[in-house]
Amino acid sequence: MAKTGIFHHVGTFLLFVAAILLLITTISAPVVKDIAILKVTLTNKTDLRNSSVTFGTFGHCILDVAPVQTDQDFCYPKHIGYNPAKIMSQIDQTTFTTAATDTSKALTRVMILHPVACGVTFIAFLLALGSGVCGAIFAAMVAAVAWLITLVVMVTDFVLFGIIKRHVNGDGSGSHAVFSTGMWTILAAMVILFFATFIVLFTCFSSRMHRQDRHSSKEAGYNGTRTTGRRRFWQRRNRY
């Protein structure tokens, strides 16, 4: 991949960046309490700041629990699937319809695809790293699968936490919900994966075309070479 090597390295680097971004979303609350996919700032507060709820891949945390004078955070145990609507109803008395509660609860189970997408993307990065044409094609295929998984779980995140965000901001309690770091990192990862897949795939076919061109040029040069034998003395013309 001499002529397309730089583009292949760019694609490989983008796969690595996408894997890191997906990892950030995966380790959101309660793994890392300050990284959230959705953050809800509550009306009650400590002497330092307003309390907040951070929702992540495997659960949630409550930060700056009132009424203490110092930071006091509490994270619930990690598990696959939880009920964010019920959590907000208990914490902030936010009203949810039955459909909204059931839908948001069911969609939290889809978030298990966060670490899956991260792992598949990292595998694509390893395949693209220093690979030949065949390895790069396989890396592009794996990257395409990672992109599809990321797209599915990203749409799920927006639908799931969009439901919670709309109800919290519309109930008039004064609490405010916003999409946070984990949401934007998965969105960025989805976009980067899309371009990385096509860049790696382009370098595969481009490298193959260059290889075929070089082979054709060598054959043309071989066929165009004339071999001149040594002439007999009577075939030589007198130059004088």
Image (cartoon, rainbow, N blue to C red):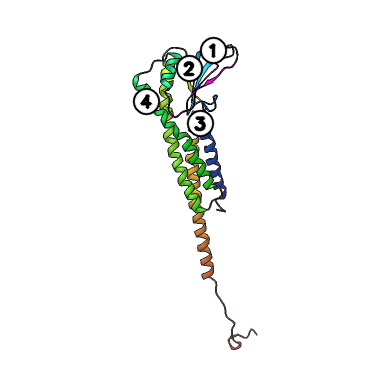
Q: Could you give the CA–CA distance between mark 2 and mark 3, rounded to whole angstroms?
A: 21 Å
Query: Label 2 vs label 4: CA separation?
Result: 21 Å
Magenta part of the protein: which range? 60-81
174 over 61 or under it: above or below: above
Up the image or down, 92 lies above or below 140; here it is above
Q: Label 2, secondary structure: give it.
A: strand
Q: Earlier in the sequence, mark 3 or mark 4?
A: 3
Name which of mark 2 and mark 4 comes first in the sequence. Answer: 4
Is label 1 in contact with label 4 (beta carbons under 8 Å)? no
Label 1: state its secondary structure.
Answer: loop
Q: Who comes first in sequence, dot 2 or dot 3?
A: 3
Are there few (<14), some (14-19), or many (20+) residues within 10 Å of tag 3?
many
Q: Which mark is residue 66?
A: 1
**Mark 1 or 3, nearer chain start:** 3
Q: Residue furthest front?
A: 77
Residue positioned most to the right: 240
Please check the rendered image and state whether residue 107 is part of the magenta-colored stretch, yes or no.
Answer: no
Disc sitting over residue 25 in the figure: 3
In percent of the image, x 49 and y 55: which residue is there? 208
- Residue 176 is labelled as 2
